[in-house]
Amino acid sequence: MLAAEAVRLAALEVLCPTSALSGAGPYPTLAGDRIFDSRLVGIDDLDAQAKFTPCLALFTIGSSTAPRGEAAAFYDSAAECTLEIVAELAVASTDEDGEPFADAMPADDWDARLVLAALCAQVRRLLQYDERGHLFRRYARRIARWEQDTFAIPQLGARWHRITMRLTVDLADDDFGDGDGLPYPLGDLAARLPAGSPAADKLAVLAAHFMPVERSPLDLVTGEDVETGQHFSARTTE
């Protein structure tokens, strides 16, 4: 569902505004510009001078749509998606071959835990309450559930400074019209993203692949008179 992609891309613009990327404004979270779309932090993304690097990663992990009821029309549907936002304090680590990679910091620092909790709180405030989150809330009709899980292996007593925020979001279903371009709401988002947005450039390319619908002309209409039972037909070109 493209509507689910619209929710994620709108959240990305709220958390990492194009204006901040261009130097025209501040970043709204502790993660700064280290906010990644559909990927985790990499080793090259880390701040080598810092004890840890706060970062966010956004993923659309599922979406669904279903009729609103037994008597609902085929186009009267309710849709939802699950958006995951992974917040972590990343550090450099090494694998068994000695190769460096980015990983979440082991949870042995209570001060770092507060930083991570503050980052998660910033995300929730921006998306649910802050005026700057209006773009996200335009497509996310309601956050039906907000869950936060700390990454851990309790059996081994191991925990890391990584929290997964899992949002169950009610949203409008894709609205496919006969015209060209992306369906609503993704097409609406593409028109509202600021110039220079990486997502806007990609959506412009994708929009060119959605051609207008060519429908066959209606030539003949047939039916039955409910009173007489007689069948009739008429050509629309006459």
Image: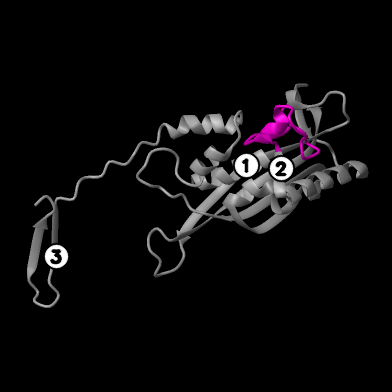
Q: Does the stretch in magenta take in 170?
A: no
Residue at 60% of width from left, 40% of height from top? Answer: 9
Q: Position of residue 3 (x, y in %)?
A: 52, 47
Taking the image as drawn, is residue 120 in sight?
yes
Please name whichever residue, 32 or 24, is drawn nearer the observer in this view of the structure. Answer: 24
Pair 3/2: label in front? 3
Label number found at residue 7: none
Element assignment for label 1: strand
In terms of depth relative to the viewer, which is nearer, 171 or 83? 171
11 or 163: nearer the eye? 11
Which numbered disc, 3 or 2, marks the residue that appears first in the sequence? 2
- Kindly check if marks 2 and 1 are in contact, taking CB atoms under 8 A apart as contact: yes
Q: Which residue is tagged 2? A: 86
Amino acid type assigned to the residue bearing label 1 in the image: Phe
Q: Is residue 15 left or right of residue 52?
A: left
Q: Which residues are magenta?
A: 16-42
User: What is the x, y in percent for residue 155?
Assistant: 79, 50
- What amino acid type is highlighted by mark number 3? Gly
CA gap between label 2 and label 1 equals: 8 Å
Q: Nearer the viewer, residue 14 or 124?
A: 14
Q: Is residue 54 above or below residue 147?
A: above
Callout 2, which amino acid?
Val
31 in relation to 168, above or below:
above
How many numbered marks have been drawn onto this rendered protein structure?
3
Query: What residue would you read off at disc 3?
Result: 223
Mark carried by residue 59: 1
Q: Residue at x 53, y 50 (%)?
A: 63
| Callout 3–callout 2 Cβ contact below 8 Å | no
Mark sitting earlier along the chain (3/1): 1
Marks 3/1: CA–CA distance:
51 Å
Q: Secondary structure at mark 2?
A: strand
